Image (tube, rainbow, N blue to C red):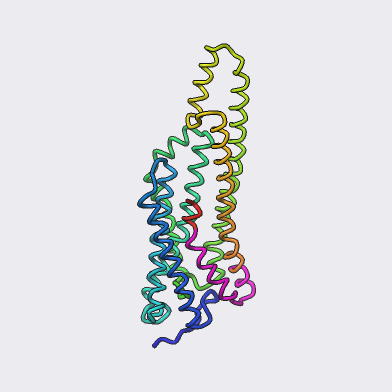
Amino acid sequence: MHVYRREALAAPADRSEMVLQSIVILVVSILSILGAGWIIVFKSLRSFRHQLILGLAASDFLMALNFLSSTAMNINGNEIGAPEHQTFCSFNGFMTQVFVIQTDYWVLTIALCTYVILAGYKSLSSWVQDQRIFLSCLPWALSLLWAGLGLKLAGYGDIGAWCWFTSDEVRLLANFVPRWVIIITILSMYARLYFILRKSHKSFISLGNSNSTSEPSRERTVTRSNHDIWRYHESDAAGRRRLQRIARLMIMYPVVYMLVWTLPTAIRVYQTIKHTPAPFALQTVDKVSNLTTTLSQH
């Protein structure tokens, strides 16, 4: 029987912790598969953004299956860190890298398209919505490229519940630095979009008030124009509630995404600087965070 040996600071200290962590990740993977599967099967594709979310859900579904396979092997005693499973570990690590960074690319793509469409860039918005196949393939192409470079330049090894980069420095530079650039970019775009929506709403209300005393024919003309611009709003009150809800969501999502990745980033920095493993419980939460992105986006 293979004697368990920690290969990375991110890996559990002994076999009992490895099995326990694998059980936790197995359960979370099943829940993630169910959640992503629900989005894939039942989510209405009523908008371009929802079609992109479907791509994110499919990526998360496949990532959870990848984790399901590695944790099931660990629990059954076929430890992924064993020499005879080196090929599987390399493949598992490659797929982990593909889907983890692909999640970031999907999130960025969704944010960019949302910003372009809602900010009123008509020509760019039309181009974006005409390039659905290209935009859907882009996260796959980029993630496969970077995962291939990772396999060639660094390789993948056992980190406990699955295989990935065994070096915290490599994971920090390859995954977490780009991720935080993406998070800051999304936060900046959505903050700007928030103010654009607020300004548009105020202009809409002001225009409605200024026309309330105009002649009937002019009022009908302006009302029709307003209806063309804000066709989703049945009334001033409904429009205000909808805009406020959209504005809140624009700010809330990048904040939630930022909070999800704060602890994993702190652990990477801590282990990189101290060369000491974080407590087992924190490392397990760190791994669980990889499986929460799709549900927070939904």
The answer to whether residue 106 is above or below residue 117 is below
Asked whether 269 or 255 is in front, the reply is: 255
Within the magenta stretch, is there residue 288? yes
Q: Residue 197, percent across and down?
A: 58, 36
| Residue drawn 61% across the image and 35% down it | 198
Q: Residue 238, percent across and down?
A: 54, 33
| Residue drawn 59% across the image and 48% down it | 187
Within the magenta stretch, is there residue 245? no
Asked whether 67 or 108 is in front, the reply is: 67
Q: Residue 213, percent across and down?
A: 61, 15
| Quarter of the figure with the N terminus | bottom left
Q: Quadrant of residue 90?
A: bottom left
Q: Residue 195, percent across and down?
A: 62, 38
Give left or right: position of 172 versus 44.
right
Give left or right: position of 282 versus 297.
right
Query: How many marks on residues?
Result: 0
The answer to whether residue 11 is above or below residue 96 is below
The answer to whether residue 199 is above or below residue 100 is above
Magenta portion: prevailing SS class: helix
Which region of the structure is painted magenta?
268-292
| Residue drawn 49% across the image and 57% down it | 293
Give left or right: position of 203 versus 1.
right
Asked whether 22 or 238 is in front, the reply is: 238
